[in-house]
Amino acid sequence: MHIRFHSLTLSRPLYAKIPTMSKRILVVDDEIDIVEAIANILSLEEYAILKAYRGYDAVKTAIKEKPDLIILDVKMPVMDGMDTLHELRRKGFDNPVIVISGHGDVKTAVEAVRLGAFDFLEKPLSQNGLLIAVQNALNSPTETETDEPDGQNQIIGQDPAFIQCLRVAERIAPTTAPVLITGDTGTGKEVIARYIHEHSKRKKRFVEVNCAAIPDELIESELFGHIKGSFTGAIADKTGKFLAADGGTLFLDEIGDMSLKTQAKVLRAIQEKIIIPVGSNTPISVNVRIISATNKNLAHEIEENRFREDLFYRLNVIELKMPSLAERKSDIPLMIDYFAMISGKENGLKQVRFTDDAKALLAERDYPGNVRELKNLVERIVVISQKSTISMEDVKMILDNRFDIPAGDFQETTALPVAPGPSEIDFFKINSLKEFRDRIERLFIIEKLKQNKFNISKTAEIMETPRSNLYKKLEQYDIDVKELEAYYGKKT
Ligand SMILES: Nc1ncnc2c1ncn2[C@@H]1O[C@H](COP(=O)(O)OP(=O)(O)OP(=O)(O)O)[C@@H](O)[C@H]1O
Ligand SMILES: [Mg+2]
């Protein structure tokens, strides 16, 4: 076992290597400023950043998103870095973790490494040390592929309306023709974009840009890159997304939200197949396949002079319109089975299934948020019911809002509604002893957490149970300590 203190070793030059694949890094610290500082440094290097401010949140995100690397602060309230690391390993997260400690505490470092941390960095972090540690961790042999063939990320559907889309996607995948994917929110535009890439001969990267999420001042540098010193804050050369996608696919998501000024530049890049990084005058030739997506009506945007017609024709060589869920109702039962299986797995429940009448009830509903809305609803039902067979009655109870589900919430979230208080559960409607016990246990744990200011170690101690068991229970009952703390924190 050896521990490296990178803040002391500056043997390799800064920005020695630009990463060739968009690796995803989860940064975890309770101090927002530190998360932002680390994220800023890493995103200059083309890494995609996920953020969490609590250990419990980090575990959830890590399991869901499987980042390639986690950078984890040791000192955090509620669930500290060591607890978090422990939980991550227990749940099978085996990508590298770099631990950050505030006081160069060698004991903590040793413990972290023993628990399987890849490396250890001391605050204050040096930019150089951070980047080198990150590069080393990402190049380490322990790194595992993120796309595991474990049944996650499958494309579900057999309705003719959907199969038609899929066939078109497969047929055009090997070509370089630009594809514009349209369709309402949550219909699977991104899912199909990735599918096209996977079925293309372009085995290089799939690079995604969410045009709606990047401020206008930054989008040019984001897309085309920049030269060190070309504007304030450009502290190093940056590779743009076009170049990053060279030989691969560039997915321009929410293209309808791109400003006219940027549209002009994108048009030129597509037409001439060259890009010029901000601050440079050397053109670089690029070979990218463009897939764009929008839920806006671009014809209407053109009429309103918000979208360039010439760009539209460039992007829209092939248009793929994703059907709404209402247009492929026969897929709903299949999707319920699939989403139930996934969220069951995530919540430690084996072989969750919905009875036929439960599925029929769900199939009758409207889903303005389409597949995403259905997925979230199934997830919530699974989490709230905590059963392996979910009946129509169970679904009804939840749809009747007995469990306080925020209406119309189509956002991608696993957050549970705040735990219902005793008065909100009608215990005598419950038949099985096990369910009764589970519900009571859940409430009991929440109450004890509240009494102990959401300190997990202390709560476990008071409950006279090992901390690991408490974690298991928190997971089993999907108790989100951070959310509870945020909710009750001010009241206790
Ligand atoms: N055919 C499908 N099979 C399985 N999951 C799907 C399918 N289509 C969509 N999903 C899931 O539904 C959610 C929404 O899909 P996606 O992000 O691709 O939609 P979108 O059309 O890009 O939405 P938006 O317009 O809001 O960006 C994702 O969680 C995705 O995994
Ligand atoms: Mg999308």
Image (spheres, rainbow, N blue to C red):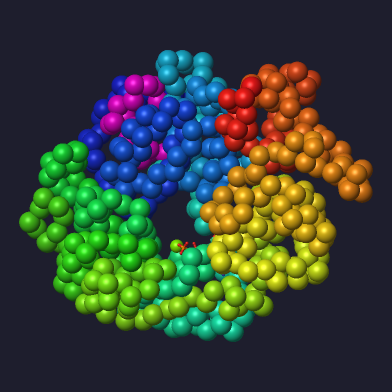
The spot of residue 143 in percent (x, y) is 48, 45
The spot of residue 111 in percent (x, y) is 55, 22
Give left or right: position of 178 versus 447: left
The spot of residue 355 in percent (x, y) is 81, 65
> Looking at the image, which residue sits at the far left?
281
Majority SS type along the magenta span: helix
Range drawn in magenta: 121-137
**Residue 298, quarter of picture:** bottom left
**Location of residue 113 with respect to 374 vertically, above or below:** above
Answer whether residue 115 is magenta in the image. no
Q: Count the labels in the image.
A: 0
Q: Considering depth in this image, is 20 or 406 the residue closer to the camera?
A: 406
Q: Considering depth in this image, is 261 or 231 the residue closer to the camera?
A: 261
Residue at left offset 73%, top offset 24%: 448
Q: Considering depth in this image, is 463 or 3 the residue closer to the camera?
A: 463
Give left or right: position of 20 versus 66: left
Ligand 2, seen in the image, is in the quarter at bottom left
Residue at left offset 58%, top offset 42%: 60
Answer whether residue 128 is magenta in the image. yes
Q: Is residue 151 visible?
A: no
The spot of residue 270 in percent (x, y) is 22, 71
**Location of residue 490 with respect to 304 vertically, above or below:** above
Residue at left offset 51%, top offset 19%: 108
**Location of residue 13 with respect to 68 vertically, above or below:** above
Residue at left offset 36%, top offset 35%: 36
The C terminus is located in which quarter? Answer: top right
Q: Is residue 64 visible?
A: yes
**Residue 309, quarter of picture:** bottom left
